[in-house]
Image: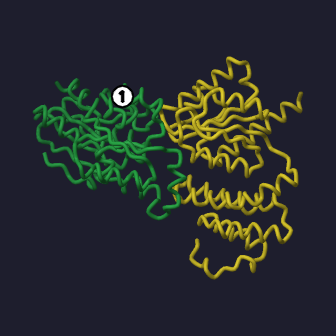
Chain colours: A yellow, B green
Amino acid sequence: MADQEDDIILSELDDEALALQMHDDLYDGLKDEIEEGVNILLGRGWEPYDVLTKALVAGMTIVGIDFRDGILFVPEVLLAANAMKGGMAILKPLLAETGAPSVGTMVIGTVKGDIHDIGKNLVAMMMEGAGFDIHDLGINNSVDAYIDALKEHNADLLGMSALLTTTMPYMKVVIDTLVENGIRDNYIVMVGGAPLNEEFGKAIGADAYCRDAAVAVETAKEFMERKHNQMAAG
Amino acid sequence: MQLPDATTLTTSGLAASGSGGRILLIACGAIAREVLAVTEANGWDHIDLTCLPAILHNHPERIAPAIEQAVTKHRNQYAQIFVLYADCGTGGKLFDLCKKLGVEMLKGPHCYSFFEGNAVFEDRSKDEFTAFYLTDFLVRQFDAFVWKPLGLDRHPGLRDTYFANYEKLVYQAQSQDDDLDRKAKDCAARLGLKYERRFTGYGDLERELIDWIS
């Protein structure tokens, strides 16, 4: 995708061509070009939200699809994510200023004993890009850390991640504690990580198992829509 | 028996010799050398060994289907088959498969655990979850299993994305080998981690094999 990269001057492209070029640049993990593209679009009067969704999230969605299809691999996805992070760092303060409504609030973190946060970070970034407020607890979280954060941030969703078969059972500890405290139904619980599957998600009482970041975003949106509909129905 | 080199064990594994042994061990290529050492030390000449490509370690979703194929292929030629894999990231799928096929497999989550001894490893892992482990084989094949698959040969800047949460590299040594010790130390330096060498020998691998075969 980057064969002609040296010849392209981003500022000379029209809006549509620039957005498409940014999809390519994200795919190729070109952080500097993404930051430049974001600044150009903002300079042309684009709303921060439009830059986020039409240039960054749309580009990252292509990355996600090609990862799922085995065309891209983890290193390339990480480079793309790093480029997107660069663009989001510019947009975040502007989005906060414009007061874009939050789709929902999520507390996310890897479970106790697990330090593998690559998948969790990708999910957090894509959720943020989709308009969710994210409270990322980082790695190695105890049940108390999750519950305290859920209460503190008045969260809608809890995301738990684990890479190891030895740490994934801790997700059940967290869910069981939510049940014991009578607050399980207050939260949509989503779980993910390489050794997990649908069956495990059901067995531990999660609302959903999400196999990748794109699925996590779609699942979270669906659950939030259902929640709003239920509240509207009274 | 002469084993192929580590690169061949990584990519191709080892075919069964078909030398008339009554028991077949189907092992991960990454533990071929250690399995052979145990069988030779015990004088088990009724044992045959076949190995799946060790690189399946990086693709755990492919392990159970490969084991099923290997057991099905060989089961008529041997009185008994043992699977020398632990769970190895299959999330219980290998356990379910072995139960269905009626064959034994190794206990524990992975080779780092059974080399150290499952009980010891479990106990230690409560405080040592920031350790990155390498065995003899993985030290020899560090580039093929870690450096290249993570893209660090092409994008060294990604190192901290992968390893910032780790604190140390623990080399679980199955053998006394100064060259491997030096190489493991170099692996730790390349990953930006502190280094610790820990001699494990063959741990539960040897104990379980003796329980099964003797």
Quadrant in which residue A206 is drawn? top right
> Residue visible at 70% across and 37% down?
A107
Using the image as rendered, state which of residue A146 and residue A212 is in the foreground. A146
Residue B21: % across, % down? 13, 36
Residue B59 place in picture, x, y as percent: 42, 47
Which residue in the protein does label 1 denote? B118
Q: Amino acid at mark 1?
A: Asn
Q: Quadrant of residue A211?
A: top right
Task: Give the secondary structure at mark 1.
Answer: helix
Tag count in the figure? 1
Q: Decide if residue A17 is on the left or right side of residue B206.
A: right
- Nearer to us in this view, A10 or B52: A10
Q: Residue at x 73, y 73 (%)?
A: A17
Q: Quadrant of the N terminus of chain B?
A: top left
Quadrant location, the C terminus of chain B: top left
Q: Residue at 64% x, 64% y: name it.
A: A26
- Report which quarter residue A105 is drawn in: top right
Image mark 1: chain: B
Q: Using the image as rendered, state which of residue B175 and residue B146 is in the foreground.
A: B175
| A31 left or right, relative to B183 | right
**Tag 1: Cα neighbours inside 10 Å, few (<14), some, or many (≥20)?**
many
